[in-house]
Amino acid sequence: MPRRARLTLPNVPMHIIQRGNNRQACFFADEDFLFYLDWLKDYAGKTGCRIHAYVLMTNHVHLLVSSRSTDGAGALMKALGQRYVQYANRTYRRTGSLWEGRFRSCLTQDEHYLLACQRYIELNPVRAGMVGHPAEYRWSSYRANAQGEADSLVVPHALYQALGPDPSSRLAAYRELFRYELEPGLVDAIRQATNGNFALGDARFGEQIALALGKRALPGKSGRPRKPSEPVSNDLF
């Protein structure tokens, strides 16, 4: 069965997961993480992508990305993946696949879901039992988004900017979101959407994405979506 075409639209945030082949490690030393982040910043600029949140685990990567073009995220991940594989193979004298095929992704609705997705990404080391608090993990965007630590890779999304009128209030409001764990149902929804290449959002968002792309955007029956009774807002995209 052919793979479903990836859902992608300009300026609609995308949650991306790239895993190591057979879930094996892809980062082995601090230098590996540093090189990856440097190249991520470089290629994000070249492909017109903005990185809102990230976490680099030992065997996989999570990114929250907005692209100015339809193919920007794909171009970013292709260039970054190839560059890092060349580095890893040369450094560790290895051959063969490093990544688990193509990356997985989902378009993410701004309202209710974008900040939840950022929390999901930055809480990954906590869920994995590696640290007790996201601030303790070095290779993530949490300390930039929640504590104001300098990180030129991170470009705050407009919804994050709306958390407060000034940097101090935004940081405090963002930290407040981490007082509670993500609801299990929301965690499951993020995983299902990302692994299945679906839209992460409510039914209306799924309908809008399906209409814009002419393909199914939520789990369910396949087929070209019917036009909704009410017009689609252009400001979604």
Image: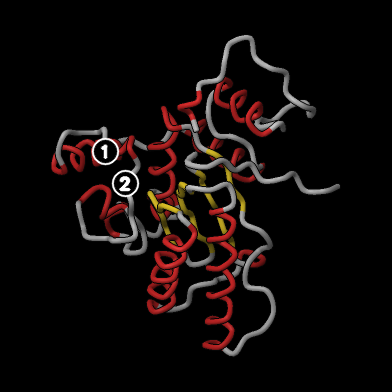
Say what amino acid the circle numbered 2 marks: Pro
Q: Write down the residue under mark 1.
A: 161
Secondary structure, mark 2, is: loop
Q: Is residue 60 left or right of residue 114?
A: right
**Residue shown at 54% from the left, 75% from the top:** 83
Q: Is residue 58 left or right of residue 18?
A: left
**Residue shown at 32% from the left, 64% from the top:** 138
**Residue 156, labelled with which disc?**
2
User: How would you rate the neighbour count of disc 1 (Cα within 10 Å): few for under 14, some for 14-19, many for 20 or more?
Assistant: some
Q: Is residue 177 left or right of residue 114?
A: left
Relative to 122, say whether 87 is above or below: below
Q: Are marks 1 and 2 in contact (CB under 8 Å)?
A: yes
Gap in Å between the C-alphas at discs 1 and 2?
7 Å
How far across and down, in percent of the image, does residue 66 sit? 46, 46
Relative to 176, say whether 101 is above or below: below
How far across and down, in percent of the image, does residue 196 sit? 67, 42
Residue closer to the observer: 210 or 124: 210
Q: Residue furthest right?
A: 1
